[in-house]
Structure formats: structure tokens, C-alpha cells
Image: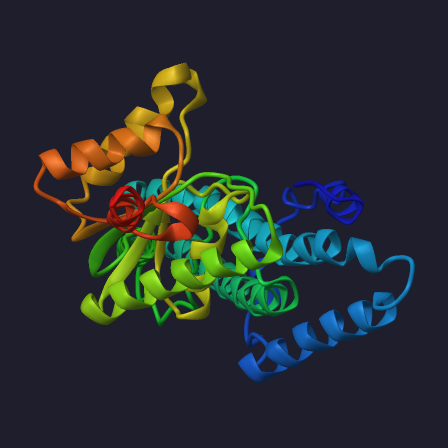
Amino acid sequence: MTTTLAAALAALELGHLEPRTEDLTGMAPPPIEALDQTTTAIWSDLFATLFNTSLERDIEELGWGLVNLFHRAASKKHATIDRLTDEIRLLIAEQDGSEISSTNLEEKIELAKKIEEAAGCYEHMRDAAAAHYLRETGRSWIPATGNRISLGVTSAIVDGQAFLRARRERIRDANTAQGTAIVFAGGRLTFQSDDDMKTFGDNLLRTLNAVRERVGDMYLVHGGDMKGIERIAASWAEQHGIQQVRFGLDRKLGDRAGFRRNEQMLSLKPRYVIAFQGNGVTERLVIDAKAAGIRVVDRRGPLGTPPAALNAQRDRTVA
């Protein structure tokens, strides 16, 4: 999704500007409470103005762009830190014990630490804005590309090697979901009436809640289709503070892409595969999961019910 707001912000390419160390020394990041209040104020002022006007239809689009503003700001900070880590590695390799080389290394580490603090602040504001977006639209905010991770503010780092090691570990942990994998799959559905849609939604949420009761440490694995029922599952997971792992399609694989994604999701050895109505790729996922001994929570019947319910109804009709 692209927006006029996002396009305007994308034009402000300031990532090449790097602050000097002395400009940041001794400066603390804003308090978390201030970040929350500022984000809430921006959101409230903007959307209170748009609500019940001719611009109301643009609220979701602008809301996505507002969250993306903070996401892009954090991404630019991390790109700067990645460049700095290369410089830190080089300075470590070139250490000759002189005061100049030691000072250069210390300044570079201090700069990287400060920029990482800034990245953490933008990530916090992004997550706060994403929470407003979820409440406003009922949908989970997903970036256009890549994953939405939060590294958090760094702790004190004493030397270059410790900084590099700590950053590697934080990136690894932020990209690694903890707990038990639960795969969710389903396609883009249409309904004959609002009542049918509500019944399906109730069945979907009831299924997710039932699985969560059985698997308290679950994290949700899905394909990230934000135009189908996976979007509902993603929003449910965010509302309940459940980690998500999204497997996008590798378009280079053509018709094979969906089946390759199935293999990747099943490689996590999930406790359950929750399957709602979908296409042939979903059908194959169910077959492969059963062959691997993975329990399938099958809800491919009418309006998100078990197929057995349809069979029982047919039997009663025949009788």
C-alpha cells in the first residue's frame, strides 16, 4: 500500500546525513511516556479532524502511512548502524594501541549506541501508532515489505566487540519467535449475507481462542495475505500479544511458490495446522500436515465449521 502521505515522506531521503558524536553526547532519548503521549496526540488530532467529513474514507490509508512514517525512520537508523558496525569492525582490526585509534573507536561505538537508542524510540512510536491503527480499523498493521521487529533500546556496551555481539544477538532474537508454532491457512472468501459473514467470523475467532487455550505459548504462522481471512487471524494475534511469523510468496518460483511456502511453514513442526477454506495450496497443506503426523484443526466446512458437520447434515438429509 502506498499513500500520498507515504510518498511525500519517502521523498525526504535524509539517511545519508550522519550526526556527529559530539552532537549526541550527553543527550538522553525522550521518556517512553512522552513518546506515547506524542503519538496519541498526532493520531487523535489528525483523525478527529477527518472523522465525519468528506476525507473520512481516507482514514485507513492515512493511518497506514502514519505508522509507516515511524517504521521507515527506524529502518533508516538501523541502516546507518549497519554501516557503522562495518566501520567498528575495521577499527577493531586496525587497533595499534595509540590514543588516536582508541578514541576513534570509542567515538564510533558511542555514535552507534545513540543512533540505536533513536531507532528504539521510533520503533516504540511505530508500535504505539500500530495499536491505534488496529483499534481504528480492526486490522493489524503490516509493512509493505520485510518484517516488523523491535530491537528495543540498548543496554550499556563497553567495547566494540561487545557492541557487535550484542547487536547480532538482538537482531537474531527479534526475528526468532519463541514458543510453539501454530500454522493458520485460509483464502479470500465471499459471503451471501452479513449474517453468514458474522457466523464465519465467530467460528474463526472461537477456533483461534480454543487453540490458544490448549497452547499457551503459541505463535501464529501464516502467509500474510492481508486481503483474506489471514488478516483477521493476524489482527486477533496482535490484539492478544501473540507473536507472528509471516511467510511471503517467492514470486520467482511461479506456480510452485505456494507449495514451497507450505514446506517452509511445516518445517517449523507446528503443534496444529488450522485450515479454513482456501485454494489447492491450502488443500495440499492439509494433506502434507496429516502425512507428517501434525494434527489439523479442519474448519473447511460451511461458514468455518468442521467438514464432518456438513457430512452429518447430508446424512440426516438422506435419511
Colouring mode (rainbow / by chain / secondary structure / one colour): rainbow
Residue 112 drawn at (x, y percent): 46, 57
Tell me where residue 47 sits by quadrant.
bottom right
Q: Is residue 191 left or right of residue 66?
A: left
Q: In this rendering, is residue 275 above or below 115?
A: above
Q: In this rendering, is residue 154 above or below 72?
A: below
Residue 88 visible in the current orientation:
no
Residue at the farthest left position: 293
Q: In this rendering, is residue 140 above or below 251?
A: below
Residue in the image at 67% along x and 72% along y: 39
Residue in the image at 46% along x and 69% along y: 239
Q: Split into 4 quadrants, where in the image is the N terminus?
A: top right
Residue in the image at 56% along x and 60% along y: 21
Residue 287 drawn at (x, y percent): 19, 32
* Count of number-bearing discs: 0
Residue at the farthest front position: 319
Q: Is residue 267 left or right of residue 83?
A: left
Q: Nearer the viewer, residue 169 or 223?
A: 223
Q: Nearer the viewer, residue 73 or 105?
A: 73
Residue 255 visible in the current orientation:
yes
Residue in the image at 42% along x and 43% along y: 87
Residue 23 drawn at (x, y percent): 63, 65
Residue 76 drawn at (x, y percent): 57, 48
Q: Nearer the viewer, residue 8 or 278?
A: 278
